[in-house]
Image (tube, grey):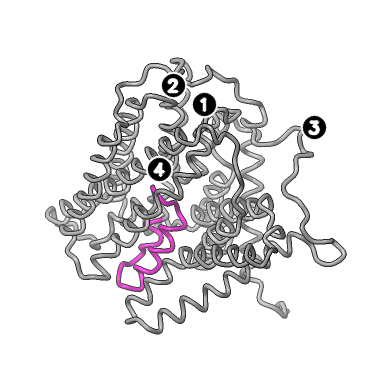
Amino acid sequence: MPPPYPFSFMLVFAFLSAMLLAGVALRARVGCLQKFLFPSCLIGGVLGLVCLHSGMLKIDIQTVEAMAYHFFNISFISVGLTPDEKLPGSDRRGQKLRGAGWMALMQGMTFPLQAVLSGLIVMLLGLAGRELFPTFGFLVPLGFNEGPGQALSIGKVWESLGFAHAATIGLTFAAAGYFCSFFVGVPLVNRGIRRGQTAYGPQQLPRDFITGILPRQATHASAGRLTLHSGNADTLAFQMALAGIVYGITYGLVRFLGALMPPDAAAILWGFFFFFGLGVALMIKTGMQMLGVAHLVDSGIQRRITGWSVDYLIVATVAAIQLKIIWQYWMPISVIALANGIMTTLLVVWCGRRLDAFALERTVAIYGTVTGTVSCGLLLLRISDPEFRTPVAMEIALMNVMVLPIVGGCTLLVNAPLWWGWSLGLTIAVFAAIFGVSLSLLCLLGYFGGQHKADA
């Protein structure tokens, strides 16, 4: 007898949950996974990939992709709802702004660098007889610099515009970025520690950081605070309801704007659902502040919602990679991913060595960000600065605000060949100009102060 209700989404959720828990167990037990500090969500995603392609489970990959898309949107909405907090160390505000500015400009260099390099390789492959979709290479900066959610979101829209399998290719580039972040980033920071390049000397990582599981005596740490009486409504339900109402408003807004545009432009709007969701969330938060009820939004629980959605996002995006599609494009994917991994590493390390303060910490933080996500950057930072005694963690938060005009503009620009009819060569030239402007600003603002020796 078939079930009386549809179960497809909940069964996929159960599958992703099982993979995440398996990833947690493996991280706690397997030494090589601990050595490179692979997060449980990435391990779970690889396990999910194996399960789906070995025939062990019959799961609709399109449903997995759809859930990844929604998790990605929720993560941005919860970020927008999270209350701003006054952080300590106002006396070092100028230094933090300077460090955040450097990281923002580094992202302003790495995004266009990856776009230019990938676009040129696509053009060269075309001359050699391997024709690829014009925006094929632009999936690299989306996957490396912005993460799997953005690569999936934009890639899915490009599929409706004629780019076959764009979502799967974008997820593959994002996965390649993650492996670059950990296989290169972790040895990079460990080498810096051995050479005494950390601001506060080599640190011994705590056992719980390596295994990923807190000891029994540390599990009393709070994940948030209650803002509603439990006899009225559960606080978690209220915090999730805020995200849900923002999601509904955003859906209506995108549908309304899409009705005013040509079909191809309207399709691209759905790839920017996360951006509209972030904007609506910020407006809701501002409205609650004006009404004097902003205290009902708890930053701790909203951060947990963000982390929850990102963990499931990564499990789903890696598991949704279709190997048979990747096999068709293995050569261009391998060449483009390898070239970008090498050039991104060289650029970040070269610029980082010329910082005059916190060079290692800032270098690994931005390296993790431009090859994976901000979470990867924070993970690499914690290896060199376990107690976050440097201002770099705060600089990452400031960087995410400062870099919005650059990343937002670049995210629009990757659509130029499809949206505005630009040639691939013209789009590459504009990306090269953005790279040049960011590099010039690094020079003009004095960020090249000489090769770093040691931090005071």
The magenta span reads: 144-170
Describe the element under mark 1 as helix, strand or loop: helix
Q: How far from the left and from the top, in percent, is residue 278?
A: 51, 62
Q: Main secondary structure of the magenta part?
A: helix
Rate crowding at label 4 as few (under 14), some (14 to 19) or many (20 or more) other CA atoms within 10 Å: many
Three-letter residue code for mark 4: Thr
Q: Which mark is residue 384?
A: 1
User: Where is mark 3, residue-wise?
Assistant: 217
Farthest bottom residue? 259
Three-letter residue code for mark 1: Ser
Farthest left residue? 127
Q: Residue at the spot x=58%, y=74% of the render?
A: 248
Instruction: Look at the picture and state if 205 lies above or below 67.
Output: above
Describe the element under mark 4 as helix, strand or loop: helix
Mark 2 and mark 4 lie on one chain; the one further toward the N terminus is: 2
Farthest right residue? 231
Q: How far from the left and from the top, in percent, is residue 198?
A: 48, 21
Mark 4 and mark 1 lie on one chain; the one further toward the N terminus is: 4
Q: Are marks 2 and 1 in contact (CB under 8 Å)?
A: yes
User: Where is mark 2, residue-wise?
Assistant: 192
Mark 4 and mark 3 lie on one chain; the one further toward the N terminus is: 3
Q: Which mark is residue 371?
A: 4
Q: Residue 232 falls in which quadrant of the image?
A: bottom right
Describe the element under mark 3 as helix, strand or loop: helix
Q: How far from the left and from the top, in percent, is residue 3?
A: 71, 77
Tell me the CA gap for discs 4 and 1: 18 Å
Instruction: Look at the picture and state if 354 lies above or below 367.
Output: above
Describe the element under mark 2 as helix, strand or loop: helix
Q: How far from the left and from the top, in percent, is residue 377?
A: 48, 39
Judge left or right: residue 111 versus residue 122.
right
Three-letter residue code for mark 2: Gly
